[in-house]
Image (cartoon, grey):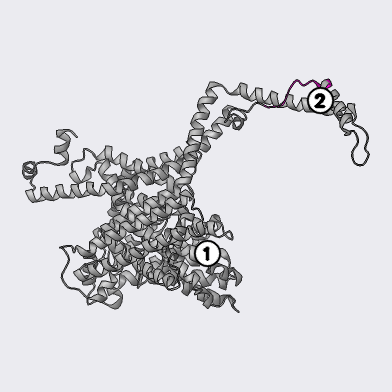
Amino acid sequence: MTSSDFQRVFPSPSELINSGKSEAKWKLSVQTQANGRARWLSSLPACLLLLAVVLFSTSSDIHNRILKIGQSSWDGYYELRYDPVQPECDRNPDIDGEIKRRMEASQDDGLGLDLFEAEPLDPDMLRQSLENAQKACESKFDKYEATAGRITPGVKMFRAVELFIGDVIAFGLSSQRFILVMLVIICAATATFTRHHIALRGIETVMDHRVSAALQTVANLMLFISAWSFRELAGQDGAEIPLSKDLLNWGWITGFALVTLISGYHLIRIPKDLEPGGTFGKAMLSVPLYTTMCLISSAYFMSAGHVAGVGIYLDKMMDLSDMFLNVGLYVWVGMLLKQSKLASLVFHVFKPWKMRPEVLAIVTLAVTALPTAYTGASGIFVIAAGAVIYHEMREAGARRQLAFAVTAMSGSLGVVLRPCLLVVIIAYLNREVTTDQLFGWGGKVFILTMVLFAAVALIMNRDPNHRMAPASEALPESLRRLKALIPYALIIVGVTLFYSLALDVKLDEFSAPRVLPVMMLAILVYEFFVYRKAPKKEDRRPLESSIREATNDTTTHIGALLFLMGLSVSIGGVIERAELMQMFPTTFASVWTVMAMLVVILVIIGMVMDPYGAVILVSATIANVAYQNGVDPVHFWMVTLVAFELGYLSPPVALNQLLTRQVVGEKELRLAELDAKGGTFYERHERELMPVIVMGTALILVAFVPLMVGYN
């Protein structure tokens, strides 16, 4: 770093004072930058791992394209990929001598007759056989020579590149599980160190911190013991553990030991910014959800004498390593989106219309549906764009309760649209449905939920006299602001066309996890060059800083989400092994009865489990009950998706509400509660009631209207 670079990054106090800033602000700025770069130490490995996933998956596309180019350039290229092996047969045999030798041998050994006194060896037939063998050998040599003659220096150079990429793909496929373990451990350790795990309420008091840290330490220690026991179990009876399996086991053991030490460190080190005191009841709400799940599942398995139980179910994540890695990529995409100006520019297009907050809320949910589908799950999108949505709603004059409700719901309506990863996983795990069927009906469900939200928002309108700006004023300004989105549209189209034309890859539910990170990185590169000389300092964002901050956020969110997903799988194991689902009847006299039961169970599952773990559990248990009782598979999964989203918005857990609070901040939540104090019951609880009313009504309609019209 040159002296000028250093001064640009770390300006002197006098320079800051001369520009109107105090020395205190300068120190705070330096400290903030230092903290950000310190976080880069943990997030850089995660960034490299995510880039490796993109590289390995894209190399498969490149390899397929190279094979097609090779086949079009050299007919039968697949035969030229390796040097041919020279035939070992004799292309110029002494046929007469061979006939004479075999005839003499048959006479001397008495082999001219078989056990059934067949005819003696016929010289003519023997000659015919030898001549046929010579022709076959000659054909092999001709093919060998023809293939060898076609392997030109150009072919050798081309296939060297092609085979290298093939080796990279093979290495990438074999490394997926190791990448996932390293990613989970790095991110979980970061989330634990920064106290970023998902809980029902934030840590505010010393009591909150102590209870949360203590139970996290116990839970992490149980994970360590379970992983160690799982490794010993795999090596019982002298069985040799494969090296790859043993490395994975040691990865889990090392990772759980690390998070145990970190949570133990938190236990003895009390942050100075916490309020003294606190109550045990509220402190229990500050315990991360993964900790509660771990304590429940560990207690169950240990009481059954199966210490390795949790470790076994966590290891099952490896069977779906590509899915969980895609989750990580989607989170990264969301955080890159958060660093860009794209979301703000989209909202700016609607500002000239001066919509009343309820109308803007309708527009917001309609606009956010598509990016939700591309970020894989509602919670991921809330993490990615929740802060921007809340801010823009407040800028438009929305009350805090409404802004919270819209932010929490911003990721809920688009999960049924193409190319949502959750729907792809459902189709992958359930051969009874296809993505085309699910996405086809998903479009209809999306329209239904949008209409319901619009109705509820307008009915609850607090300012019926509000007037929008006339179109003659608003439209020209909107069109002018729309110009700022043209470069972004060109980048999106350009990246999409590149993958389509150069790699023959369409942007769909299967390619989105590897295409979208490239698209967002291209957008950040564009913004870096466009805004690097912007008048306002806050608009000038170094590319490294944007990627670093996005990856810092990604690391903590991946740690929180994947740990929660992993422990959700173990809770699913408890439910499965405890045969809780078997407590419910499997046959019903009426499809209406089974649907009512399914709705209740699915909403409860949505309340306590992450979407991916819940889909795995439902696929293994409840789905077959629905099919056997006459519920159409597509109908069932549409009900499941809506029920899950209702669960994620419903107390007492309300995961999407928790994520909204996490990205917006505890201060805004307290202000929202103060603003609504003294209002009606609905006004005081609008942020919870509005989503529940909309998604609850949608669930009832999606579940029972098809039964009324005889869809099943």
Label ID, residue 131 = 2
Label 2: how many Cα within 10 Å (few below 14, some 14–19, many 20+): some
In the rendered structure, which amino acid carries the disc numbered 1?
Answer: Ser
Q: Residue at x 23, y 38 (%)?
A: 532
Is 302 drawn above or below residue 560 in the view shown? below
Residue 689 lies, with reference to residue 427, above or below; the image says: below
Between 525 and 236, the one lying in front of the other is: 236
The reply to whether dot 1 and dot 2 touch (C-beta < 8 Å) is no
Name the quadrant of the N terminus.
Answer: top left
Dot 1 alpha-carbon crowd within 10 angstroms: few under 14, some 14 to 19, many 20 or more? some
Disc 1 or disc 2, which is closer to the eye? 2
**Badge 2 amino acid:** Glu
Label the magenta part by its dominant secondary structure. loop
Q: Which residue is mark 1?
A: 619
Q: Position of residue 554 (x, y in %)?
A: 32, 52
Which segment did they paint magenta? 87-96
Answer yes or no: is residue 371 visible. Answer: no
Q: Position of residue 102 (x, y in %)?
A: 84, 27
- Could you say whether the residue bearing mark 1 is in a helix, strand or loop? helix
Residue 357 located within the stretch drawn in magenta: no
Residue shown at the point (55%, 75%) measured from the top left: 594
Q: Is residue 278 above or below residue 613?
A: below
The disc placed on residue 456 is none
Q: Nearer the N terminus, badge 1 or badge 2?
A: 2
Q: Which residue does the image show at 47% across and 41% down from the upper left?
A: 171
